[in-house]
Structure formats: C-alpha cells, structure tokens
Image (cartoon, grey):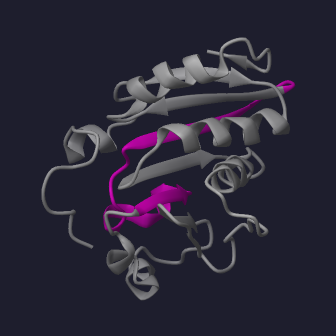
Amino acid sequence: MAPRPGPLPGGGDDAERRRPGARGMTLEIAGGDAQERLGVALARILRPPAVVWLRGDLGAGKTTLVRGLVRALGYEGTVKSPSYTLLEPYRLAEVDVLHLDLYRLGDPEELEYLGLRDLLTPRALVLVEWPERGGDLLPPADLDLGLEHLPGGRRIACAGPRAGAVLRKLREILAGDSRFRL
C-alpha cells in the first residue's frame, strides 16, 4: 500500500509517525470502565481522517478502548473484536470507523485483500490493534497508543504528531476524574 498522497492529517511526516515516542506523553488509568471512558473522551477529540495505532499485550484493553470510542460516536450495536475477521467497519453519520485487529494477520500483503486502501477515505477513523504486523502496508499513525498493564490499571503511552494536542484536550475533558492520572 502506497503512502497517502497530500498532506498527512495532524502534520508531521512518515518518519516522525513511525518513530516510537515521537511527541510522546503518558497517562495512567484505573480499571476497565476507565478504559471505556478514555475511548469516549477520544471520540470527542479525534476527527477523520485519522489513523490510531493501539499497541499492547493480549488483554491490555485495546478493544475495550475502541468499544467506548465507537459507542460514543453513536453506534448502538455490539462492538466486536475483529480478532478473526481482521476488520470491523462501523458506518456512522459523520465518520466511518474501521477497527482492525492484525494479531492473526499472516502476512502484511493480506491488507490488500481486505481492501484497506479503498477504505481510507476522508471520513475514515482507522483504529489498528497490533499495527506492527501490518508492516509498511499500514498507513502511518497520527496517534500511537501503547497500553501497558499496571497493578489496578493501565499506563498508556501516547506518541505521534497528534499526541500533544490529544493529551491537552484529554486533560480538559477528564479533569477531576480520579480514575485518570495525566
């Protein structure tokens, strides 16, 4: 998959987007309900076109975060993990959310069979679990979230061209919520 033409959403270049820790910060959250709440907050901030990478071990809460985000955008059905289908699309009034889980991806070339290139429209908010399995065929991240288990919660490292702006807005939205340490 060739890089997207024209300016990249959020500014920055491919090298910056692919560099771990670029413009990075961290936050800590307590519990699964806070993970969903973080998704709700991100839904208020992120605007398409955007690509968000979600990294973390199995059970780190990547799909839980996506569930909060997709529901906050107005989806009323079941938000499923695309572990076996690789892709779950959610066509909503203002945005097309594309939730990919690449854990079972055998080869990055399989992204071509999914038709991912055709789905990358100006309305697309692409949420990718296990992005490292997509290789160079995956669009670069505007926001790269690394989820790590902590006793009683998670640490989330935010990197990428939009990380600073996203965390500033998260601080405003989540101020006073004791489940979050920003």
The quadrant holding residue 67 is bottom right
161 vs 44, nearest the viewer: 44
Q: Residue furthest left?
A: 6
Q: Residue furthest top?
A: 176
| Residue 101 visible to an observer of this rendering | no
The quadrant holding residue 89 is bottom right
Q: Which residues are magenta?
A: 124-152
Q: Horizontal and vertical percent for residue 112?
A: 37, 83
Q: Is residue 60 above or below residue 166?
A: below
Q: Horizontal and vertical percent for residue 162?
A: 37, 34
Residue 131 magenta:
yes
Identified at 30% across, 42% down, the residue is: 17
Residue 136 magenta:
yes
Q: Horizontal and vertical percent for residue 19?
A: 32, 38
Identified at 67% across, 35% down, the residue is: 38
Quadrant that contains the N terminus: bottom left
Identified at 40% across, 26% down, the residue is: 165
Q: Is residue 127 above or below residue 61?
A: below
| Residue 90 visible to an observer of this rendering | yes
Q: Is residue 9 above or below residue 35?
A: below
Identified at 49% across, 49% down, the residue is: 53
Is 114 situated left or right of 154 in this image? left
Is 179 situated left or right of 56 in this image? right
Q: Horizontal and vertical percent for residue 148?
A: 68, 34
113 vs 40, nearest the viewer: 40
Quadrant that contains the C terminus: top right
Q: How many marks?
A: 0
Q: Residue furthest bottom?
A: 113
